[in-house]
């Protein structure tokens, strides 16, 4: 369920799909793209970048997010996130990316991704209900 204009989400999915075409994934051959929609209507994309030292691989979602923050600062103004992949396989964002995104999503943000039966769109709060929060000690 989402209150977003379906055309807006369609464009965001298309942007994620285009980003997937730029992925560097010679090891898994799983080419992922992500597109972040900001409250001003702008979109920032990213793709996964793998490395022969496999653990150094960086997901499309985090690459998009880090690019966005580097370009426009750390305001939590992301209102929608689309994830896509070249294979059209089910591809919800991984847990690590959900945790990272949790610090930058606006209230009511949604995530859209290929599910088991076509595109699924669900609220970020529902896909990631219990983010880790660090409360620094005061004493
Ligand atoms: N990957 C992403 O880019 N996003 C995700 O949410 C999950 C996985 C990438 C990492 C790796 O390059 C490839 O998909 C296979 O795991």
Image (cartoon, rainbow, N blue to C red):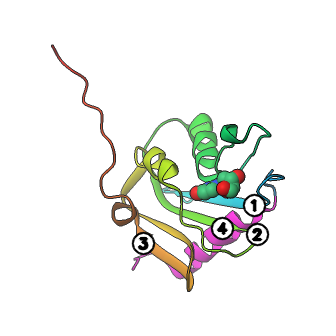
Up/down of 136 relative to 87, above or below: above
Q: Are marks 4 and 1 in contact (CB under 8 Å)?
A: no
Label 4 neighbour load within 10 Å: few <14, some 14-19, many 20+: many
| x 59%, y 68%: residue | 91
Nearest to N terminus: mark 4 or mark 1: 1
- Given residues 13 and 83, the one toward you in this image is 83
Which segment is the magenta one? 1-21
How far apart, in angstroms, are the residues tagged by discs 3 and 4? 15 Å
Q: Quadrant of the N terminus?
A: bottom left
Does the segment drawn in magenta span residue 121? no
Nearest to N terminus: mark 2 or mark 1: 1
Q: In the structure shown, which secondary structural element does the residue marked by tag 4 occupy?
A: strand
Q: In the structure shown, which secondary structural element does the residue marked by tag 2 occupy?
A: loop
Nearest to N terminus: mark 3 or mark 4: 4
How far apart, in angstroms, are the residues tagged by discs 4 and 2? 7 Å
Image coordinates of residue 7 in percent, x first then y, are 58, 79
Residue pointed to by mark 4: 84
Name the side, left or right, on which 29 lies relative to 101.
right
| x 69%, y 60%: residue | 33
| x 41%, y 77%: residue | 2
How far apart, in angstroms, are the residues tagged by discs 3 and 2? 21 Å
Q: Hey, which residue is sitting farthest bottom in the picture?
A: 117
- Given residues 128 and 34, the one toward you in this image is 128
Q: Quadrant of the C terminus?
A: top left
Residue pointed to by mark 1: 31
Q: Are marks 4 and 2 in contact (CB under 8 Å)?
A: no
Ligand 1 within 8 angstroms of badge 4 C-beta: no
Taking the image as drawn, is residue 126 in sight? yes
Label 3 neighbour load within 10 Å: few <14, some 14-19, many 20+: some
Give the quadrant of residue 21: bottom right
């Amino acid at each position: 369920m989402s209150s977003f204009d379906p055309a807006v989400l369609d464009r965001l999915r298309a942007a994620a799909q285009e980003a997937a075409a730029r992925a560097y994934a010679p090891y898994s051959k799983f080419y992922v793209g992500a597109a972040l929609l900001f409250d001003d209507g702008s979109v920032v994309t990213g793709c996964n970048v793998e490395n022969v030292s496999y653990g150094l691989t960086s997901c499309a979602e985090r690459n998009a997010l880090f690019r966005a923050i580097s370009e426009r600062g750390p305001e939590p103004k992301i209102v929608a996130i689309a994830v896509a992949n070249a294979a059209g396989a089910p591809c919800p964002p991984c847990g690590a990316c959900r945790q990272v995104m949790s610090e930058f999503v606006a209230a009511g943000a949604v995530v859209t991704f290929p599910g088991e039966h076509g595109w699924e769109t669900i609220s970020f709060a529902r896909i990631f209900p219990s983010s880790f929060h660090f409360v620094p000690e005061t004493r």
